[in-house]
Amino acid sequence: MPAIFPRWINSVPIALALGFPAFVATVIGSVWYWASPKFTDAGYQPEQPVPFSHRLHAGEMGLDCRYCHNTVDRAAVAAIPPTKTCMNCHTLVKPDSEKLAPVRESAQTGESIKWSRVHMLPDYAYFDHGPHVAAGVGCNECHGRIDQMDVVEQKKPLSMHWCLECHRDFEPRLRPLDQVTNLGWSGHYDPRSDPNRERPVDELKPPLHCSGCHR
Ligand code: HEC
Ligand code: HEC
Ligand code: HEC
Ligand code: HEC
Ligand code: HEC
């Protein structure tokens, strides 16, 4: 009796089983990518009340990011430094500078400087700096070369697609833990043979499921 279906049909269920998840991922991926209304906010650069320059303080002077953003490796939010941190230096450095007048005023009145927010996710998306920094993701992966900016600008889209792109393939984007705030670092790094990692790479589990980021 002649076969009703050609032979290759037999391999279809296997092809489906293997190919289908990838197919679904691709479809969902492209829908996310293109349907995301704010697929890019990159370029956002609000004006600040004081002309504070990261290029000068973090770049040329080489202050570590954590000198000012001192909660970034243990808390969700990277604290913006209080005026006191600025006055550690500016009681002596340029004490008469016009540009620093709002800083001195803030120190006198105790009222914080009203810095404009640059990076901001919508409320329904959850983000925590702590695990990213602890895993060895450099600040520049998400913020660009802040140490070369006179005025901070959002360089990355911070869209869902963008988050997931790294979560799906994060290993090549890790660096040694002591290089996280060294934004110019570029070197070969094999996280699997690094004895100084807090947690082995296999234990890192960036979420891909919805409730990982929408809690
Ligand atoms: C001397 C203190 C100081 C140092 C050092 C410093 N920052 Fe900042 N940073 C600030 C202040 C003040 C602001 C708020 C004003 C602004 O946006 O420029 C800020 C803002 C930012 C923002 C934008 C925050 C937002 O509203 O979205 C990012 C991102 C940032 N810093 C990253 C870094 C990184 C990365 C480093 C290290 C390379 C660093 N900072 C070093 C003081 C500092
Ligand atoms: C570790 C010391 C240090 C800290 C902390 C520091 N600065 Fe500075 N800042 C300097 C130095 C040094 C200069 C360059 C002075 C010069 O040009 O001679 C400078 C320059 C400036 C200038 C330019 C002043 C001018 O007249 O050209 C501004 C504005 C400024 N800083 C703001 C801040 C703010 C805001 C903070 C806190 C978030 C801060 N700085 C924290 C050391 C510091
Ligand atoms: C994996 C991506 C990622 C990395 C790595 C990262 N950031 Fe952020 N950062 C963000 C996102 C996303 C926001 C906006 C958070 C929000 O709106 O809830 C943000 C916001 C900030 C802010 C504003 C205050 C806040 O927490 O909302 C500062 C300051 C900051 N980052 C500094 C840093 C510094 C310094 C480093 C390196 C030590 C760093 N970031 C590493 C993604 C990242
Ligand atoms: C450059 C790589 C990279 C980018 C970009 C990135 N992540 Fe992650 N993320 C990681 C890694 C690596 C981990 C694993 C940390 C662990 O398991 O300890 C992680 C873990 C997480 C976790 C689980 C840990 C926790 O905080 O509960 C959440 C949630 C998360 N990321 C949210 C986000 C969001 C939201 C964005 C985009 C705004 C983002 N991530 C962008 C690399 C990245
Ligand atoms: C790695 C973190 C992460 C995961 C996992 C994630 N999301 Fe999101 N999602 C985000 C972020 C960040 C935004 C905000 C994007 C923006 O502001 O452009 C967002 C936005 C959204 C939005 C608003 C529309 C849009 O595209 O901006 C919807 C709807 C959404 N997510 C649904 C989902 C669903 C459904 C899943 C699971 C299949 C999921 N998300 C998994 C991070 C994530």
Image: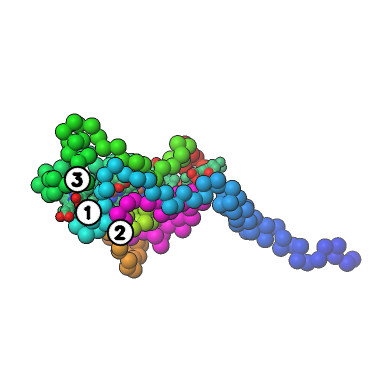
Q: Is residue 214 magenta?
A: no
Disc number lying in front (3 or 2): 3
- Residue 41: image location, x then y, percent: 46, 49
Q: Nearer the viewer, residue 215 or 72?
A: 72
- Marks 1 and 2 in Cβ contact (< 8 Å): no
- Residue at 72% from the left image edge and 60% from the top image edge: 12
Q: Earlier in the sequence, mark 1 or mark 3?
A: 1
Label 1 near ligand 1 (CB < 8 Å) = yes
Q: Quadrant of residue 183?
A: bottom left
From the viewer's side, name the closer residue of 93 and 164.
93
Q: Which residue range is magenta in the image?
A: 149-177
Which label is found at residue 57? 1
- Residue shown at the point (39%, 60%) measured from the top left: 173
Q: Which residue bears the numbered disc 2?
A: 148
Q: Residues within 10 Å of mark 1 (few under 14, many from 20)?
A: some
- Element assignment for label 1: helix
